[in-house]
Image (cartoon, grey):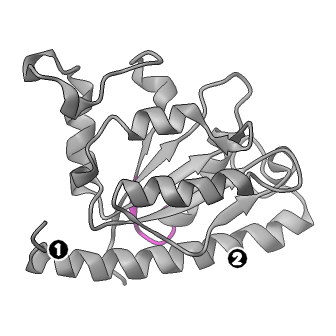
Amino acid sequence: MSESLKIVAFLGSVRQGRMCERVAKFVRKCLEDRGHTVTVIDPLELGLGQVIQPMHFYRNPAEIPAILPQLNEQLKEADAFIAIAGEYNSQISPALCSVMDHFPPVSYAFRPSAIVTYSMGNYGGIRAAMLLRQFLSELTTVHMPNMLVISKVHESLNDAGECAGEDATSRLPKAADSMINQLEWYARALKKEREVGLPKQ
């Protein structure tokens, strides 16, 4: 059996009727079926409000909300990251930017990241996916070329995160496998290099 990885998945929506929970269930099952440990960070459950000061900007560490150092430790222990986001005004969702920007780039460094986007339309949030490439690069992660883009998400996945319909059943698992195959390869390769030592900055 291949080495199990620790993977942190970020959800990028807090609005009513959000579809990201369906997508997260689907992605989580795909990963857990391969033996990986998945931690989901959901901004809706954190209760931190809409605007939060990044952890590394606090002058007094005692003022940092307790949840932020806890989450930061999970990030530093992770082998890979997944960003799950819809498309807001053809851009990255503000909730995803907010929650990920609250941690310093060093917490993401030298680990791979995968992009999962979705929409209720035909394009599956692909415009947000293109912007996520730059965003994740600035956080110093290595983003995967293969992405999971889910169009008509309300028809493709049911509430349980299961594929609904013949097209989704044949298409989505293959696309997820392609993305995860790359993520696993990079995660294991970079993990070995981190164990050897990190380059001087």
Amino acid at circle 2: Lys
Task: Please state if 36 lies on the left or on the right of 3 as rendered.
Answer: right
The local secondary structure at tag 1 comes to helix
- Which quadrant would the C terminus be assigned to in this image? bottom left
Write down the region rendered in magenta. Answer: 32-38
Give residue 164's mark: none
Q: Is residue 168 above or below residue 196?
A: above
Task: Please state if 159 lies on the left or on the right of 55 as rendered.
Answer: right
Q: Picture coordinates of residue 160 (x, y %)?
A: 69, 44
Q: Picture coordinates of residue 58 (x, y %)?
A: 17, 24
Quarter where residue 21 is shown:
top right
Task: Please state if 133 lies on the left or on the right of 175 as rendered.
Answer: left
Q: Which residue is located at x 51 percent, y 25 percent?
A: 44
Task: Please state if 62 lies on the left or on the right of 22 as rendered.
Answer: left
In the picture of the structure, the residue carrying the numbered disc 1 is 194
In the picture of the structure, the residue carrying the numbered disc 2 is 174
Q: Is residue 106 above or below residue 47?
A: below
Q: How many marks?
A: 2
Residue 33 is a magenta residue:
yes
Name the residue furthest front. 201
Are the residues at dot 1 and dot 2 in contact (C-beta closer than 8 Å)? Answer: no
Residue 133 is a magenta residue:
no
Q: Picture coordinates of residue 18 (x, y %)?
A: 70, 32
Q: Which residue is located at x 20 percent, y 44 percent?
A: 73
Amino acid at circle 1: Arg
The local secondary structure at tag 2 comes to helix
Q: Which residue is located at x 80 percent, y 49 percent?
A: 153
